[in-house]
Image (cartoon, helix red, strand yellow):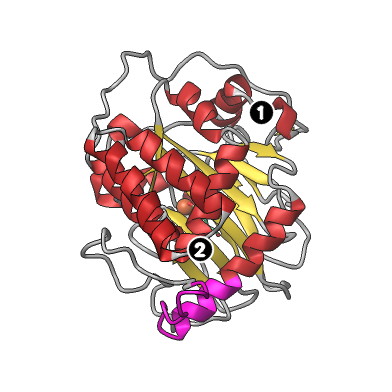
Amino acid sequence: MASQSISEIMSTVDNFISIGDWESALQYLMKENTQQPNSVLEQQLVDLRIRAFRESKWPAPDVKWPPAHDVLPSKGSDLPEINPDSLNVDSLRSGIMGNGGLIVRGLMDSHTVDTMRDNIDRTLVDRQSGGGNSDSSEQAWYKRSTQVKGGPTQFFALGRERSSESGSVWAVDSPRVASQLIEFYHSINLPGLLNAYFSEPATLSVKKWVLRKVAPNNGSKSGWHQDGRFLGDGIRTVNLWIALTECGGDSKSPGLDIVGGENRKIYETGTQGAPFDWTVGQGLVDGLGPESPALCPKFSPGDALFFDHYNLHRTAFGDDHTENRYALESWFFAASRAPAKQIPVYF
Ligand SMILES: O=C(O)CCC(=O)C(=O)O
Ligand SMILES: [Fe+2]
């Protein structure tokens, strides 16, 4: 794409922004970038999405919360499972609030799954080599937005070397991946679904939108945690976790352990065998009883799990795993209650 075209595109974007029309600015920029993906436009998309949230108003809706919901049928104590066709505001509310989680089989198509796995590998390699090294015709797979201030220069498991073999990366640190993911979310009408769920727009965030490649048997242990423990009071959330490789159950790579059920409270941390002061001990989880079973669902590539900040969960490390596990973690917040510390990202 000639640089003239980019400046023309950006001038149209600036016109929308000058009248405060962030939605049109971002829709237009996203459309132009979809037609001809370009690293300059992708970086602009990330930067402007962070600005758009900060510079827009997010009035709180007047709604009863939690809203009315059912409990979905499931096999025994398992989480309910549906196909993408049955995903709507009712099944999402019932699954998350009534059952403690909802599995949607095959939510991401296999082409996008393959692309995302490849994206994660490229991003980890580019991060390891310093990031932003590619010339303008190549993609810079890892590049920190100037709109992200005060964060770590990289994000990786505590005490671990930055590696291209495995790790976690903020999605916004890879502008191309962030753009492709938002295109995918729009293609399945996630903005509309979450708007209905929250009765207001949903937002992503810099810090709770993560690409993951988890190595098998890497010596890690992870404690049970609830994201509601550290994301702040009064939040409303939906986490969309998507497996990009087969994992969990009796498979060869670490899935996600999750406690199902209707319990919606924040549990005590740092006791009953908890390895860290912010995690919940195994003893406490064992004592929750049959209403709150600890599950390790088996996922195929493209399967999704929806849950929220009340769910106890952890990476399901096991000794008998041999394969890497790739996954995407996307926490969505009701916009009027989104924690500023997580750096909301308009989507
Ligand atoms: O993918 C994992 O292993 C951890 C995910 C997680 O903690 C989350 O999605 O909040
Ligand atoms: Fe988590």
Residue located at (41% from left, 77% from top):
132
Secondary structure of the residue carrying numbered label 1: loop
Few, some or many residues within 10 Å of mark 2 (<14, 14–19, 20+): few
> Quick check: 268 left or right of 241?
left
Residue located at (55% from left, 44% from top):
240
Kindly indicate the quadrant of the structure image that contains residue 307: top right
- 70 shown above or below 92: above
Few, some or many residues within 10 Å of mark 1 (<14, 14–19, 20+): some
Residue type highlighted by circle 2: Met
The image position of residue 204, as x and y in percent, is 41, 44
Residue placed most toward the observer, 259 or 48 = 48
Q: Which mark is residue 156?
A: none
The image position of residue 252, as x and y in percent, is 76, 67
Q: Nearer the viewer, mark 1 or mark 2?
A: 2
* 133 falls in the magenta region: yes
Some atom of ligand 1 lies within 8 Å of the CB belonging to the residue at label 1: no
> Quick check: 162 left or right of 343?
right
Label 1 and label 2: CA atoms lie apart by 38 Å
Residue type highlighted by circle 1: Leu
Question: Is residue 309 visible to the viewer in this orientation of the structure?
Answer: no
- 12 shown above or below 39: above
Residue placed most toward the observer, 78 or 22 = 22
* 135 falls in the magenta region: yes
Residue located at (55% from left, 34% from top):
190
Kindly indicate the quadrant of the structure image that contains residue 170: bottom left
The image position of residue 64, as x and y in percent, is 37, 13
Q: Which mark is residue 1?
A: 2
